[in-house]
Image (cartoon, rainbow, N blue to C red):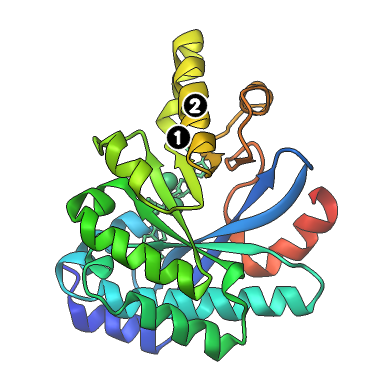
Amino acid sequence: VLVAAELQEAIDDGQLVLHYQPVLHLPTGDVTGVEALVRWQHPQRGLLAPCDFIPLAEQNGMVVPLTRWVLGEAARQTAEWERAGMPLVTGVNISAAHFGTGSLVADVHDALEAADLAPERLVLELTETSVAEDPLRAAAQFAQLRIAGVEVAIDDFGSGFSSLSQLVSIPAGVLKLDRSLIAGTETRRSESAAAIAAVVGLAKACGMRSLVEGVETADQLALVRELGCTLAQGYFIARPMPAAQLPQWLAEHG
Ligand code: G
Ligand code: G
Ligand code: MN
Ligand code: NA
């Protein structure tokens, strides 16, 4: 079973790696961003997916140190790409546990400063459930991040039960539609398309950009474009890839 010491060792020994999944800006067809997704190159167990260790890290108090590493590495890499002529906005996933600690704003600031990266280059992805847990605290932290110039995205929207009244009170820049919404178009096309259109309209009315996750086919990409979404992400566009592969991928597809 995974212990805190093992994860600390992973951070210290450089066993964690980030893969990056491109985000397509639909109005221009340009790749304007990526989402950073952590993996653990475990010495015995091989490459572990986040679902194999993030929930444990959330339970044993290691998710804050882990996320500090992710923020630092994502900021460093984004700054390196920018210097190489590839300006991208990088999304980093933030756990509810971290959001609740109050150190998030300082942790983000430290990562930006160490990398000499402009705050506009990072987007913090928070799930709707972490927002719903403590909406007042969430609103206060979002406001602080906004003052610091860092954008916030609400992740996995449509998969939980957060209220619309909470959503409209949160100053997020991007609304990420959970991939179950686009997946639904395969079996219940008109109903699912209507749900996406409604959420996209809501996002627009609240001054947010919409991002549809889980786009797996050409037909789904055409549909989300037609429905007025701003951004799209999914296997049809690209799978998450190691940082070293991204420049070539951008040269071929960007
Ligand atoms: O890459 P993959 O599909 O296996 O990611 C699964 C889940 O793990 C996603 O929900 C994603 O939000 C989460 N995840 C990936 N990287 C990170 C990270 O750096 N921090 C946190 N808290 N969650 C992550
Ligand atoms: O943070 P979030 O829960 O959104 O994590 C995104 C996860 O979804 C990543 O682990 C990524 O590998 C996965 N993913 C990205 N695109 C697709 C897709 O098109 N289909 C499916 N099934 N999963 C995807
Ligand atoms: Mn995410
Ligand atoms: Na998501």
Decide if residue 95 is on the left or right side of residue 218.
Answer: left
Closest to the observer, 131 or 21? 131
Q: Residue 213, relative to residue 68: is it above or below? A: above
Residue sitting at x 49%, y 81%: 72
Residue sitting at x 54%, y 40%: 210
Does dot 1 land on a helix, a strand or a loop? helix
For residue 80, what is the image quadrant? bottom right
| Number of residues whose C-alpha sits closer than 10 Å to that of mark 1, classed few (under 14), some (14–19) or many (20 or more) | some
Residue sitting at x 36%, y 59%: 50
Decide if residue 110 is on the left or right side of residue 52.
Answer: right
Tell me the number on the disc at residue 154: none
Type of amino acid under label 2? Ile
Instruction: Report whether the residue tagged 1 is closer than 8 Å to ligand 2.
Output: yes
Does dot 2 land on a helix, a strand or a loop? helix
Note whether residue 33 is visible.
yes
**Mark 1 → mark 2, Cα distance in angstroms:** 6 Å
Pointer 1: what residue? 179
Circles 1 and 2, Cβ within 8 Å, touching? The answer is: yes
Decide if residue 164 is on the left or right side of residue 122.
Answer: left
- Report x, y in % for residue 207: 53, 44
- Report x, y in % for residue 14: 45, 84
- Report x, y in % for residue 167: 34, 42
Pointer 2: what residue? 182
Type of amino acid under label 1? Arg
Q: Residue 108, relative to residue 187: is it above or below? A: below
Instruction: Report whether the residue tagged 2 is closer than 8 Å to ligand 2.
Output: no
Residue sitting at x 45%, y 87%: 110
- Report x, y in % for residue 35: 54, 57
Q: Residue 142, relative to residue 77: is it above or below? A: above
For residue 45, what is the image quadrant? bottom left
Q: Quadrant of the N terminus?
A: bottom left
